[in-house]
Image: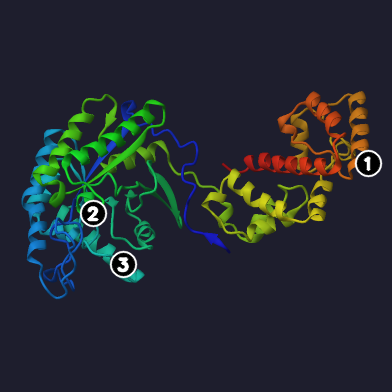
Amino acid sequence: MNRYPRDMQGHGQHPPSANWPNGAKVAVQFVVNYEEGGENCILHGDAASEAFLSDIAGAAPWPDQRHWNMESIYEYGARAGFWRLHRLFTGANIPVTVYGVATALARSPVQVAAMQDAGWEIASHGMKWVEHKDMPEEEERAAIADAIRLHTEVVGERPLGWYTGRCSVNTVRLVAEEGGFDYISDTYDDDLPYWIEVGARDQLIIPYTLEANDMRFATAPGYITGEQFFQYLKDAFNVLYAEGVDGAPKMMSIGLHNRLIGRPGKLAGLKKFIEYIQGFDAVWTPRRIDIARHWAAEHPNVRYERPSRMDADTFVENYGGIFEHSAWIARGAFALELGAGHDTAIGLHNALCRIFRSADHAARLGVLSAHPDLAGKLAAAKRLTDESTTEQASAGLDALTDSERATFTKQNDDYTAKHGFPFIIAVRDHDKSSIMAAFETRINNATDVEFETACKQVERIAHYRLKDLLP
C-alpha cells in the first residue's frame, strides 16, 4: 500500500477542550534536563568529547580526547546550576519534570535525592546523552531497556515518562513497544497531548519544545540575554492564555538545562517569567506525569477502523457505496498515497473526489446515471440502497401524497429527457419545497452546466455519507 507515515491531521480545526483542573486557561510545564555526567566523553566510553549545548562557541567533538573546558561547563550544571534552579522552583512552589539521563543520575545521587524531596517527577532521558539517529533498531531497543534498568536502580522506581531528544526515526515506536510509559515526549508537533496507536497499545504523546527552550542560548540565532528569554516566554504565554480565555486551553512546555539557564544572567529571565505568570489566575503548573494522568482520564483514546490502515477488500467494502454503485472510485482512492489525514470524513472525501474528478466524461456520467430518481419507482419498490433510502426519508420524500409523487415523477422524466441523467441533489440540505424549487430552476440550465452541478451534488452526497461513518 502507498501510505504516508506522517500525521498532518492532529486534533484538526476543533481540538478537544483540555479541561485543565480548576478551570485553568493554560498549563505551563517546566522541564529541567539533567544531562551532566551523561554527555559524550571518553571517560564514559565514547569515541569523542561532547560538542552540543554549551557556551563554547563553535564546539566540535575531539576524537579520542577529553575536552577539559566542555567537561567543566557540564560540571557547572551539576555543581551550581542545578541548585540555583532547585531553589527557584521550590521557592515558587512549582513542581517540575526532570528529564534525567540515567548515567547522569547515577553520578549525582545528592541531586536525585533533592529532586525526590521536592516532589519532582524524574522521567527518563535515555541511557546516555548521545545521538540515536544512526543506532540499529535492536541496539536502540537495548539502550532503552538499559536506561530503564539503571534509572530504576538509582531512583527507586521506573520512569513513567520518556524523552530521548537526540532520537532516531524508530525511537517513539520502540519506547511505545516497551509498554510501560504513561507518555512519550519525542515530538514537537502540537500544543496539546494526543494518542498514537502502536500495535495494541494506546500510547499518549505529550509534545515538547525546542523554541521555548534555553538551548537557544547556545544556538544561532538564539537568546543573548535573560531578558530576551523572558520576553519570548511572556509573549508565548500571553497568546496561549488568551486562547484559554476564549475556551481553547493549551499547554506550554518550557525546556531548561542546568548548565545554561543555571547561569545567573540567564536565570534572571526565567525568574522574571515565573513572577509574571504568578500574577495570573487560572494557571496550572503541573509535572508532565500530571498532564498525562489528566489527559488519560479526560480524553481516553477511542479506536476506530482507520481507512489508511485497511486492506483493499475492506476499504472497498466500507466505501464502495459512497459514490452510488461506483466501487471503482473506492478502488482508485485506495491506491492513492493515503495517511492519517485521510482517516476523517473530510480527508477520505478528498481522496474519493480526486478519483471522481480525474475520471473522463463517460465515467462521471456513469456515476450520475447510477443515482435513482427522487421518490421514483425504485423508492416505491423499496429497491434503493440503504444510503439513498435514508437520505430521501430525511427530506420527507418517503411520505409524499399521490399528487406530490405524480409531480416528482413528471419532473424527473422531463429532467432526464432533456439532460440524459437523473436529477441529483443532496437532499440533506433541503426539504420538499426547496427540492421542488431546485427542480424548476435547474431543468432550464444548459446540459453542460447541469452536468457540473450534478457532479458537485454527487460529491456533496458523498460528504454526508462519510460523515455518518468517520469523525
Give the image's coloring scheme: rainbow
In the displayed structure, 451 sits above or below 106; it is above
Q: What is the CA distance from the residue labelled 2 to the residue labelled 3?
A: 27 Å
Q: Is residue 218 visible?
A: yes
* Residue that carries the numbered disc 1 in the rendered image: 417
Q: Which residue is nearer to you in this view: 115 or 271? A: 271
Q: Nearer the viewer, mark 2 or mark 3?
A: 2
User: Could you tell me residue 39's position as x and y percent?
Assistant: 17, 62
Q: Amino acid at mark 3?
A: Glu
**Residue at image mark 2:** 219
Where is residue 128? Give x, y as percent: 21, 63
The CA span between labels 1 and 3 is 69 Å
To which quarter of the image does residue 46 belong? bottom left
Answer whether labels 2 and 1 touch (C-beta < 8 Å): no
Residue 173 drawn at (x, y percent): 39, 59
Q: Secondary structure at mark 3?
A: helix
Task: Inspect the image, locate mark 2, and give the three-letter code of the amino acid beneath it.
Answer: Thr
**Residue drawn at 69 percent across, 54 percent down:** 355
Circle 3 is placed at which residue position?
140
Query: In the image, 433: left or right of 122?
Result: right
Residue 207: image tag: none
Q: Is residue 24 left or right of residue 455?
A: left
Q: Are marks 1 and 3 in contact (CB under 8 Å)?
A: no
**Separation of residues labelled 2 and 1 (CA atoms):** 72 Å
